[in-house]
Image (cartoon, rainbow, N blue to C red):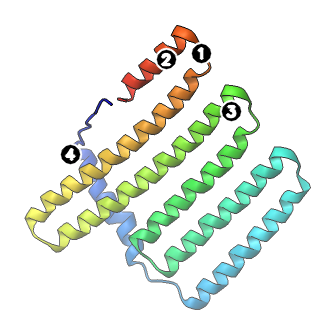
Amino acid sequence: MKTVKFAVSAAVLAFSLGAAQGAWAANEMASPISKADYKAGKHRIEADYKVEKKNCGSMAGNAKDICKAEAKGKERVALAELEASYKPSKKANYEVAEAKAKAAHEVAEERCDDKGGNEKDVCKKEAKAAETKAKADAKAAMKSNDAVVTANEKSADAQGKANEKVMDAHQDAAKDKRNADYAVAKEKCDALAGDAKSKCVNDAKVHYGQ
């Protein structure tokens, strides 16, 4: 497999450090909600889900499946956000991002069922690619934040190592995104045949460094 290395510019690095110290750090230091508010929030989310799921009952076919996926996705995200408010942490922030990615993926996959053949296969690959990219960005943000916090607590030398960790995190994310985009491109090639398909696959490999 061909290895492709991506350099992270100083501007991107600076933005990454700022982002890590911003949203993720701020959420982690936020004052947690009370246990009473947590319990009330959980009951409200569960009640909302039951109502939305019941409303899907009047639908039919794939529209019903999409409706159920949307209802379940909203519940999943709301519960993750509630947990993050009750017990703020970097892990909780990541789990919120992960819940959003998973929810969006499940709805997108259901929508793909309205299609057929290769168009449906491509649709599902694109849905999975979007989830992979969202998770990769969230993971990079969490790793970047860890590196920044560690560097701030230690010496100036640690800052340089933190920068390297941030760069590595973004390179890992870029690799995951590349692989996801390649999977989509390769799936599109399945609509072709013979030499045209072979050329399509080879072009995709070169473009995405596979």
Q: Residue at x 18, y 74 (%)?
A: 153
Which of marks 4 and 3 precedes in the sequence? 4
Q: Residue type at mark 2?
A: Cys
Q: Which mark is residue 148?
A: none
Between the C-alphas of marks 4 and 2, the distance is 35 Å
Which of marks 1 and 3 precedes in the sequence? 3
Q: Which mark is residue 10?
A: 4
Label 4 packing within 10 angstroms: few (<14), some (14-19), many (20+): few
Between the C-alphas of marks 3 and 4, the distance is 40 Å
- Residue beneath label 2, please? 200
Label 3 packing within 10 angstroms: few (<14), some (14-19), many (20+): some
Q: Contact (CB < 8 A) between labels 1 and 2? A: yes
Label 2 packing within 10 angstroms: few (<14), some (14-19), many (20+): some
Q: Residue at x 85, y 64 (%)?
A: 54
Q: In the displayed image of the protein, which residue is found farthest to the top?
A: 195
- Residue beneath label 3, please? 120
Q: Residue type at mark 3?
A: Lys
Q: Which mark is residue 192?
A: 1
Occupied quadrant, residue 37: bottom right
**Mark 4 secondary-structure assignment:** helix
Occupied quadrant, residue 80: bottom right
**Mark 3 secondary-structure assignment:** helix
Image location (x, y in percent) of residue 81 = 55, 70
Between the C-alphas of marks 3 and 2, the distance is 19 Å
Between the C-alphas of marks 3 and 1, the distance is 15 Å
Q: Residue at x 53, y 48 (%)?
A: 131
Q: Contact (CB < 8 A) between labels 4 and 2? A: no
Which of marks 2 and 4 precedes in the sequence? 4
